[in-house]
Image: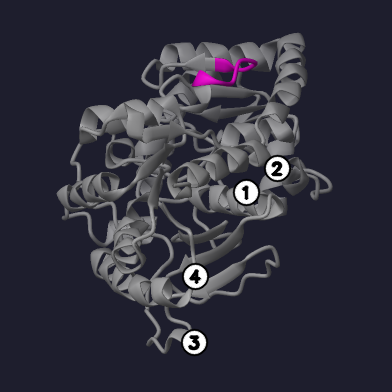
Amino acid sequence: MKVLMFGWEFPPHNSGGLGVACHGLTKALSNQGAEIVFVLPKKIKIEKTFFKIKFANSKPLKIISIDSSLTPYLSSHQYSRNEEKAGALYGRNLFEEVNRYARLAKRVAASEPHDVIHAHDWLTFPAGMEAKKNSKKPLVAHVHATEFDRTGGLNVNQKVYDIERAGLGAADKIIAVSNYTKDKIVSHYGIDPNKIEVVHNAVDPADWQNAGGHFGELKKKNKIVLFTGRLTLQKGPDYFLSAARKVVDYYPDVLFVFAGSGDMERKLIEGAAWLGLADKVKFVGFLRDAKLEKLYRAADLFVMPSVSEPFGIAPLEALTCGTPVLISKQSGVAETLKHCLKVDFWDIDEMANKILSILKYGQLREHLKEQGGREVGKFSWQEAAARCLGIYKGLTTV
């Protein structure tokens, strides 16, 4: 099976879970015999041997380099310079880059033999549609998040929504990362549920066995409660901060760590100071690989307070590193992960109570750590790849 796959990011040059998912899935697909050409919008250094990588601005395509960022979202610095633009979420000129990428997809489709086209999220849907027009091959649209997840249903970007709806309509099959996401696709985009297959994300334990030592300077006498992810509305870091204020009143020997960056960073830093948490909250920026693993292993609890999380790979990463998790009920992973604590993202009183239960009761923490560590083993990229191959075969078998 020859797969022409379009993505926007790939480790180690990723800004979030999309790149992680692309890496895990493509590696597993390759292990099961699929021949993959992975198309990225800009040439970056990637040392992978299990599939072929094409860059939309590489010399073989004779294309002038696209001067673009691989991450579509505004950084905290960019956001602070554009606060007058209400609801600003996406980087400057992003739509021009998406359209340019789509135009180049025709050339890639013409030069790379393939049986099926696989496009990850709205950024690559136009590219997938252009490739389909050229080769007449079936298109699979893989939805890792919708505009309603990213905005919490507020200030939905009409351009993004229109691209998503067009891509979902043009796709021969849609892959949703959870039933939670499938329901959103049906309700917000008017898609026939029979067109959608659910393929859960996973985690590769081998990726989380490399870090030695811990963030000892953070531990000292404090327990650590960890948040990782973009500091943006979708991820709910403000609810995490509000819960922290309540926890500290009853358990002062705790440090709340934010690992990530995004448009809410300055607001959160100012909010921590206003709440009197300056010495109880630490912002460490965006981390990856060994540094992130060390922080996972140092934490006593990982919290994912997302307003709307299509799946949520981070809790699986935390459990793989031996850290119990508290996750938002408004998430895809909540529908399948059992040995964890769950809370509605908006219920900061209950969030604080459950954080306190982990900090105070070591037996509960150890139970969730042990049982969650066993359960996370059922999330396999090999299984996800097998599901995708089944979808491909269903589209290509006459």
**Image spot of residue 116 (x, y percent):** 46, 56
Q: Which sits earlier in the primary sequence, circle 3 or circle 2?
A: 3
**Structural crowding at the residue carrying mark 3, measured as other residues with C-alpha within 10 Å and reported as few (<14), some (14–19) or many (≥20):** few
Asked if the residue under mark 1 is in contact with the one under mark 3, i.e. CB atoms within 8 Å, the reply is no
Tell us which disc is closer to us: 4 or 3: 4
* Residue range highlighted in magenta: 335-341
How packed mark 4 is, by other alpha carbons closer than 10 Å (few <14, some 14-19, many 20 or more), is: few
Q: Is 165 situated left or right of 391 in this image?
A: left
Q: Nearer the viewer, mark 3 or mark 1?
A: 3
Residue designated by label 1: 24
| Image x and y of residue 302, in percent | 61, 29
- The Cα–Cα distance between marks 1 and 2, rounded to whole angstroms, is 7 Å
Is label 1 in contact with label 2 (beta carbons under 8 Å)?
A: yes
Disc number at residue 60?
3
Choose mark 4 or mark 1, whichever is in front.
4
Q: Earlier in the sequence, mark 4 or mark 3?
A: 3
Residue at mark 2: 204
